[in-house]
Amino acid sequence: MLFHVRMTVTLPTDMPAEQAARLKADEKELAQRLQREGTWRHLWRIAGLYANVSIFDVADAQALHDTLMQLPLYPYMDIEVMALCRHPSSIHDDER
Ligand SMILES: O=C(O)C[C@H]1C=CC(=O)O1
């Protein structure tokens, strides 16, 4: 099942730089693993914002929830989710 997810990150202004760097490095490692595994299908920066638009391919809403909650930056994210389904005019057959 595909989900469109928008994540907006707000780190506390008083967070020590080393802690922020560690969180971002851990987030990158997990994000890249999930992309290699096919769970995190697309990851786009929203220009000008510390935010992204992503497409996740997971079994169901519970699996998405569990995945998002694992993200190291999750406590600092505002997350919006839209469930997607196949468009009848799509020419792509790899969309579920
Ligand atoms: O930078 C972000 O948008 C937040 C988060 C999502 C992937 C990642 O590496 O960090």
Image: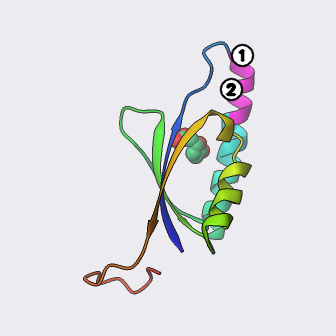
Q: Which residue is mark 2?
A: 20
Relative vertical location of residue 96 with respect to residue 11 in this rendering, above or below: below
* Residue 71 place in picture, x, y as percent: 69, 47
Among the 4 quarters of the image, the one containing residue 49: top left
Residue at point 67%, 43% (across, down): 27
- What amino acid is found at the position of numbered circle 2 in the picture? Ala
Tell me if mark 2 has few (under 14), some (14-19) or many (20+) residues whose alpha carbon lies within 10 angstroms of its own: some
Residue positioned most to the left: 89
Quarter of the render that holds ligand 1: top right
Secondary structure of residue under mark 1: loop
- Considering the whole magenta stretch, tell me its main secondary structure: helix
Relative vertical location of residue 21 with respect to residue 42 in this rendering, above or below: above
Contact between marks 1 and 2 (CB within 8 A): the answer is yes
Q: Which residue is mark 1?
A: 16
Secondary structure of residue under mark 2: helix
Q: Is residue 58 left or right of residue 54?
A: right
